[in-house]
Amino acid sequence: MTRNKLQLVLLLASSLTMLTACLDTDLTSGSTASNEHEHALDINTLIEQAEQARAEAGRLGFEWSVTGPLLEVAHATYKAGNHEQATTLFQEVKLQSLLAIDQARYADENWQMLVPVID
Amino acid sequence: MKGLTCLSAMLVGSLFISVPSFADPQSDSDDVRAFFQKRFSNITLEDYADGAYALNENARMQWEEIEEFPPYEDAVDEGMVLFETPFANGKSYATCFPNGGIGIKQNYPKYDTETQQVITVEYAINQCRTSNGEAALPYGQGELAYVSAYMASTSRENIINVVIPDDEGALAAYEAGKKMFYERKGQLNMACATCHISIAGGQLRAEITSPALGQTTHFPAFRFGWDDIGTLQKRYAGCNTQVRAKPFALQSEEYRNLEYFHTYMANGLPLNGPGSRK
């Protein structure tokens, strides 16, 4: 084996070890009390952010029609105890609302682009 | 020194360019007409009152057949009865409108400089009710739409004459309506102008999209999709929802401003409402 090849094998081996170590911690530290608390805090912050973003999109007149119904589903999912799926849904509500806010900004600057031009 | 003069000339020049040009409704309307005239060179200005049916012979023939037994006739009759029935206080709709409410739709929407807002026929109908102690009615369909349909029927053939007074508020309302027409929104990121100007006359699923010009002439309209007569703003809400944008409340300031802009564009066209549409 040349020196270069040896280095490569060592490198691969060490990354594999590190990766397993990471996976390990992920798998073992899933449900300690403090983690659950953190998770709860996180989702509450996310809900607040999602609702704030949605309100802002609405204030600008750019809320999407699909966002409100999605928010209802998200809340129902959260109430039913499915926090993981609820998180995904609240994230989607937040993302849609941020995109709608961007649309409003874009419209403010560019709405005249669709006004017909006579040449 | 010469450089400085040039620089200040450029600065002053750019001031003129970048300040948003003040609303000029007449030239807006001229531009839209010129645009459509170029695209649909074979139809006349009056033809725009027929919407998508002006653009497709087949659809037009089917529509003319339907209009032989107008599906909105009952609504107009019912609207007339409602219109003529006095309120509990003895007054009636006629007391709230110029000329007793007959043959006046061509002048709406109006800008009321006193209350600084756009007044549509439907908005005025509910104003009339509440100022006479009656409950406001829903704006989309039902009794209010019937009253409006009757009022439209007495204004048939009258030439649309929306006035934008030389008033800052009126121009701002017009400009807000114009902006709403041209801004992209909803999950599909489309503007009214996308469908009713840019791709007007094109086929969208099973429908031909009508040109923005003349879209307001025949409302309230009977739509088979609604199975009833509905107001113009009900259609606005439907089109907003089509692109997955949350619609505004009917007769909100936003939609009244939009109707102001949208109807002004049709000035000079004859009213032909109520009408029927697929």
Image (cartoon, grey):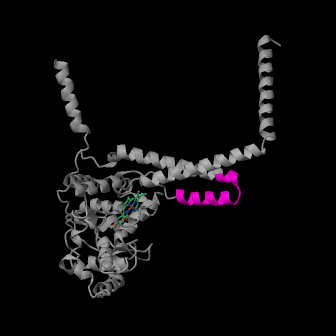
Frontmost residue, B141 versus B191 = B141
Is residue B215 shown left or right of residue A102? left
Is A31 in front, or is A37? Answer: A37
Residue B239, x across and y down, in percent: 42, 62
Q: Quadrant of residue B274?
A: bottom left
What segment is highlighted magenta in the picture? Answer: A66-86
Q: Outermost residue toward the top?
A: A3
Left or right relative to A58: residue B88: left
A3 relative position to B119: left or right: right
- On screen, residue A1 versus residue B167, left or right, reads right
- Residue found 33% across the figure and 75% down from its top: B126
Is residue B156 something one can see in this rendering?
yes
Residue A73 lies in the magenta-colored region = yes
* The quadrant where residue B82 appears: bottom left
Could you say where residue B202 lies in the image, as x and y percent from the top left? 38, 57
> In what quadrant of the picture does the C terminus of chain B appear?
bottom left
The dominant secondary structure in magenta is: helix
Is B87 part of what is drawn in magenta? no
Provide residue A49's location: percent of width, then percent of height: 55, 48
Q: What is the quadrant of the N terminus of chain B in the image?
A: top left
Quarter of the figure with residue B163: bottom left
Observer-nearest of B94 and B240: B94
Total label count?
0
Residue B257, above or below A106: below
Q: Is residue B46 above or below residue B184?
A: below
Query: Foreground residue, B166 or B31?
Result: B166
